[in-house]
Structures are given as C-alpha cells and as structure tokens.
Amino acid sequence: MNVYPIKTEANSSQQLGQPVGVTLDRFIKRKEGEFPYASGELSQLLRDIALAAKIVHKEISRSGLLGIEGAFGRENVQGESQQKLDVIANIRFTRAFRNGGEVCAMISEEDELLIPMNQDASYIVAIDPLDGSSNIDANVSIGTIFSIYRRKSRRGTKVKNEDLLQAGSEQVAAGYVLYGSSTMLVYTTGCGVNGFTYEPSLGEFFLSHPDIKTPKDGKLYSINEGNYHQFDRGIQEYIKFCYRREMSSRYIGSLVADFHRNLLKGGVYLYPPTRTNPDGKLRLIYECNALAFIVEQAGGQATDGKRRILDLQPNCLHERTPLFIGSELLVNALKNCLITDLRPTGS
Ligand code: AHM
Ligand code: MG
C-alpha cells in the first residue's frame, strides 16, 4: 500500500485546479489528422460554431445589463413568441456560417424557410440557435443545438430537398452548447462524444469531458408532469414505474440542460404527445436528431416510442416528434410501457 501519496504532474495540476490543457482548436486539428483525406472544411465549420458560441455566451452573460432580455414582439414559424436573445443568437450563428463559407444552406428554428448560403460548399447545418429561451428572463441555463449533414447534390448547384430532409443517421457531426454555470460545447463526429468547457478569460474552450459515456441505468426522470392528464396511458404507467423505483424528478424545461445532466448522471428525458402538441413539441431536424446522435455515441438510446429517432425520415423542415432519450435501460423500460399507441387520452 502506498502510505505517502506521490506527487505526480497529473495530481498536482488537479489540486491546482488547472484546465486539462487541450484546446478545442487543437483537438479538432488532431482529429482531422486521423482522416488522411479530410479537407479541413468540417473542422473549419466546427470552429465557426465555437466562435459564434463564444459571442452568444458573452451576450447571454450580460443580457440583464444590456436590456436584451424579454420578448422580441414577434412569433416564429411555430407560433411561439420570439425572445430578443433568440433573434440575436440566430443572427450570430447565421453570420458565422456565412463568413465561414463552409455551409451551403442553414435550417433554423427561427426561420420559416431555409437560408441559402455558399452554393459551392458541402455542408448543411440545422440549428436551434437558442433553445429553452422561455427561461432567459429567469437566468436559467439555455443552449444551442446543431446538426451537420453533407449535401447529396453536386456542389455548385442549388440545394435540393434530398439535401435538407435527411434522416438523423446521415449526420456527420452534431452537438450542443450549454450556457449554464459554465458554458460547455459537447459534440460528436461519430467517434465518441467529447465535452469542452469555456474559459472566458482566455477565450478558449478546453477539453474537460473526454469520451463521455452515459450510465446504462439512472435515477433521474425529466418530464413536464403538469401535462400528466394529457399523456397516453403508457406514459402514465411509465411515470408510475419511476415512482416505484423512487427515481428523482428533475425538469428544467431547457432541453439542453436536462439532456446534459441526464447524460452525465444517468436518466431519461421525455416529451410525449399531448393534447396541445399531438406530435410532441420538439423538432426532429434541429433539436432531436443532434441529441439522439450524441446519446447513441455515449451508449444511450433515443426513440419516438416506436422507432429510433435517427431512422425517422423528415417530411418538412419544422417537423415535430415525440422524444424519449437517455440511459439504455430506462428507455427500454419505457418502450415496454408503450404497448398502446401514442395518442393522448383526451383526443
Ligand atoms: P423552444 O425551442 O421554443 O425553446 O422550446 C423547446 C423547449 C425545450 O428546451 C424544453 O425541453 C421544452 O421546450 C419545454 O417545454 P414545456 O415548457 O412544454 O415543458
Ligand atoms: Mg428549441
């Protein structure tokens, strides 16, 4: 037995609270080097996202002082009230992609139609620039969610439906930024999931959560239980299952924050169909697909109750889907409860 702890470089740097030391930039470069034919365009696109995230981080952290909290006074295509920060974040990401030149079209929660960009570029980005925006005024965690697809049509031509309406399984990269007690960027390119924490005084994201794996089982369930009487019986049975297992209910109402906590600690997030949202509330292309890709890469599961989220074929840009996502055993238990169809009881 080692009675006297030996001072190593690793444990002394932990004691001093130093960052892990690998910047996002360096990490992206390293990963690119592992693919001999990589052109560097995807790497540049990831850097563009990180840059816009830093700017949005800055705007959010000062929003109370700048008077940019609250409603913008307009509704988006979903009929939801847009917040000023929704609009600001959308502008920041749009600009980053336009200036970067790696994106041929962008799909955003805040824009009804696709935004055409550089026709000669290879990538489509689908993004929710600021999710959970109804929480902004209360200084609660919010996030950005993004998916990246390679176009199917030839470069230099107009983007087509086949480019925009790809199943989630076609994503080449996906991630989210969580503006929480610290700002984090978590992403995958299909080779595991890595998380980076932002150090504002240095203006850099540092690798803080390498190769994230989600627990197989968990103690947390996240659902808006105020809608209980609108849920299908299968969902109500599942909630009772969570009670019987004495699980803890944790619901922030910001998808990225709820998802991130469950990813690290083990748990399940549910947004089932309700009377007001018979197809569920969340959007397939720019909310669910990215998180489904990440959760699978981390060892978890995502389903709409019947099918794997990543296998769903979208029919329109703003399509909604029920979402059940999280630890493998918890999602399996949910599937067992959903023996009836997913229509809400009151419909
Ligand atoms: P938004 O894109 O308009 O912000 O809506 C999505 C948000 C999610 O972040 C969150 O999980 C969910 O809506 C909360 O919905 P509810 O308030 O119905 O529980
Ligand atoms: Mg959203």
Image: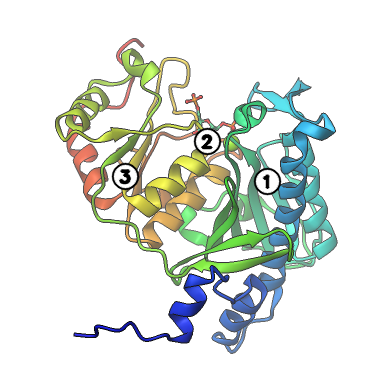
Is 69 above or below relative to 145? above
Count the labels in the image.
3
The extreme left residue here reads 244
Dot 1: element: strand
Measuring 52% from the left and 35% from the top, which residue is drawn there? Answer: 254
Q: Which mark is residue 267?
A: 3
User: Pointer 3: residues within 10 angstroms few (<14), some, or many (20+)?
Assistant: many
Q: Quadrant of the N terminus?
A: bottom left
Measuring 42% from the left and 47% from the top, which residue is drawn there? Answer: 261
Look at the numbered disc 2 and say if its residue's Cβ is closer than 8 Å to ligand 1. Answer: yes
Measuring 40% from the left and 55% from the top, which residue is drawn there? Answer: 295
Q: Nearer the viewer, residue 339 or 295?
A: 295
Q: Marks 3 and 2, how far apart in space?
A: 15 Å
* Discs 3/1, front: 3
> Viewed as shown, does residue 299 lie left or right of 50?
left
> How are the residues colored?
rainbow
Q: Earlier in the sequence, mark 1 or mark 2?
A: 1
Q: Marks 3 and 1, how far apart in space?
A: 30 Å
Q: Quadrant of residue 159?
A: bottom right
Q: Earlier in the sequence, mark 3 or mark 1?
A: 1
Q: Which residue is mark 1?
A: 107
Is 336 above or below relative to 100? above
Q: Nearer the viewer, residue 57 or 331?
A: 57
Q: Amino acid at mark 1?
A: Ile
Is 198 above or below relative to 68? below
Q: Which mark is residue 254?
A: 2
Q: Amino acid at mark 2?
A: Ser
> Viewed as shown, does residue 295 lie left or right of 107?
left
Q: Quadrant of residue 132?
A: top right
Measuring 23% from the left and 39% from the top, which residue is drawn there? Answer: 335
The extreme top residue here reads 346
Would residue 312 be seen by someone viewing this image from the given angle? no
